[in-house]
Image: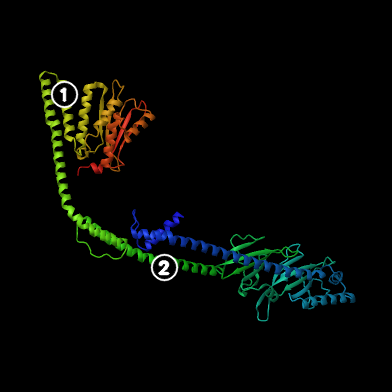
Amino acid sequence: MKQLRKYVTDIILNIFKVKKSAHPKIKQQLILIFLSGCIIPILIIGLFSLHNVRKQMNNNYTEQLKAEATRLNSTLFDITTSLFTTCEPFILNDMYNSVLSCTNFDDTQTAYYDSLTSSLKTIRDNYASISSIHVYTNNPNIPGNAYITYSDNDFKNQQWYNALSKNTWNNYSITTSENSLHQKSFELTLTRKIAVTASHYSAYIVVTISNVYLKNRLIYTDNFILASLDNTPVFFSSDSDWMNKHMPMPDNFKGGYYQYTGPVSIDSTQYYSTIAMFLPYKTQNKFYILVSKFDAYDQIYDVTVQYIIILLTAILIPAIFILIYSSFFSSRIITLRKVMHQVRLGNSNIIENFRGDDELSETFEDLKATMDLIQMKEAKFYKSLITEQQLINKQQQMEFKMLASQINPHFLYNTLETIRMQALSNGNRNVATSIKLLGKSMHYVLENTGTESTTLAKEIDHVKVYLAIQQLRFGDRVNYSLNIQDGLNIDQYKILPLLLQPIVENAVIHGLEGIEKNGNIDITISHIQNDNLIIKINDNGNGMDQNELNHLDSRINFNKPEHTHSIGLYNINQRIKLFYGAKYKLQVTSKIHCGTTVILTLPMQNILDE
């Protein structure tokens, strides 16, 4: 439901040319309210009703077609059963058996022969369903007439005989005939074998159903009807053009017993149809009946179009009214906002009249009434503001002077230089060297305090000075190596000052803790293809297990006041994120007895000194 509402909302906003925003405007809010309260309910109810109507129409057509197919099956079954039982007196009649088996046609056989002919003629004259009835025999001793036919060559020249399957005594088939106008007709024919005593003779009774009779019995509606036998072409159709064509079947038709209701392709067009099959009385044939309603889908389509037109009308008419009203109301809001914006900018020349007579008009009048009061207090306000700013400026100047007097870089540096010269005079070069390195380090720190950047080369020199001091202090316990990728000119890049020394200091104090000798700090500077500068500071200390590493990572990213021993790494991480962006940060990896590595990822584009 939420997805449907979002989809419909986007469509309506595009129709009304209203831009979506994080904070909807008045016009957009009115349209959204209209969507929620009118269009979406109407659309849901309309689509639900349309779905039910289409479903009901489908059900009605299904029931109608199934009922029609059942009627046709019943009617055709009744006709074929009646035809079958009509032939029953001829099958086991001793008198007819005698005449069809005779080798000497005497007076008695003549009487039987006349009786057989009379019975056949009576059936032909009294049953409207029968268009023809014949007895076929291969006995050459029996004379032929209009109802009894001698067939040589064992009946092989007869259509009905060729349709008989092996050992079949009763069978339906489709026979063709041609009238005087050379027009073919296809007729449903029943063939039944007559029991003949003489084994060297055979006889069959063949009965053909009248197509006119079938038409009168089967066609009661304007539905399209097809009937076929087994896998043979259509023998009955409400449309004569379909005679002797193969019945259209769905793709899933595999013969045998079959029932289907749904779309069927007839002349390359899909029609709503029902296909039903039945087995005739005492034969192995299968009859298939197809009933189609040609206008079913058209009627469903017409109803769908009518519903959509009604639904669109029910939506568009209110939409036009809400669009006109929202545009008018929004224009008044915009006018009032422009006036208030002018007032905020100090412009007292605002419009005199405002359209409408409602709360917005009263708001406009109140705004005009407050303009005089604002202008009266404006001068007093700016005067007090200027006075306050002057006091703030004086305070900041005093604080700056106090700070400068407390920490004077020249004073500190000159004092250390004096002490260094005294040490040299006394021949103590180690002390002099230590003081010189300390002075150089302090000079760099004081020089870069408050600055935003320094060169990568200067930052590395500062780290070297710090490590030289630590080597004087710890001797062979602290060693270091510096690896810079070929082609990387560190004088061309700028970096945040005082970024690397705290990390190196952390490696010396914590990483090499417990190392008595051969401690090493490895600094590697490189860049990768996505324009990132990678600085790795690795120590060969004892390292940390996973719990200690997780704890340290938590302190670096979420520092608390009590975590004073990791505040340096926390500050470095925060400085990187604030200056370069959230995706750049400090990472720590470590394994127990394998040392610890701190990785800085910085953007080369940002630190490049253009």
Q: Residue 427 placed where, x, y %?
A: 12, 18
Q: Residues within 10 Å of mark 2 (few under 14, many from 20)?
A: few
Which of the two marks, 2 or 1, is nearer to us in this view? 2
Q: Secondary structure at mark 1?
A: helix
Q: Mark 2 belongs to which amino acid? A: Ile
Left or right: where 389 falls relative to 159: left
Q: Mark 1 belongs to which amino acid? A: Thr
Whether residues under marks 2 and 1 lie with C-beta atoms below 8 angstroms apart, the answer is no
Q: Secondary structure at mark 2?
A: helix
Quarter-of-image position of residue 24? bottom left
Left or right: where 515 falls relative to 129: left
Residue 246 shows in this picture: no
In this rendering, is residue 489 above or below 25? above
Q: State how far apart marks 2 and 1 are (Cα).
A: 92 Å
At a point 27% along the width and 64% down the height, the residue shown is 354
Colouring used for the render: rainbow
The residue carrying mark 1 is: 433
Q: Residue 357 placed where, x, y %?
A: 31, 65
The residue carrying mark 2 is: 317
At a point 31% along the width and 42% down the height, the residue shown is 583
Q: Residue 495 placed where, x, y %?
A: 22, 38
At a point 77% along the width and 78% down the height, the residue shown is 125
Q: Nearer the viewer, residue 529 or 427?
A: 427
Instruction: Name the outermost residue toward the bottom.
Output: 180
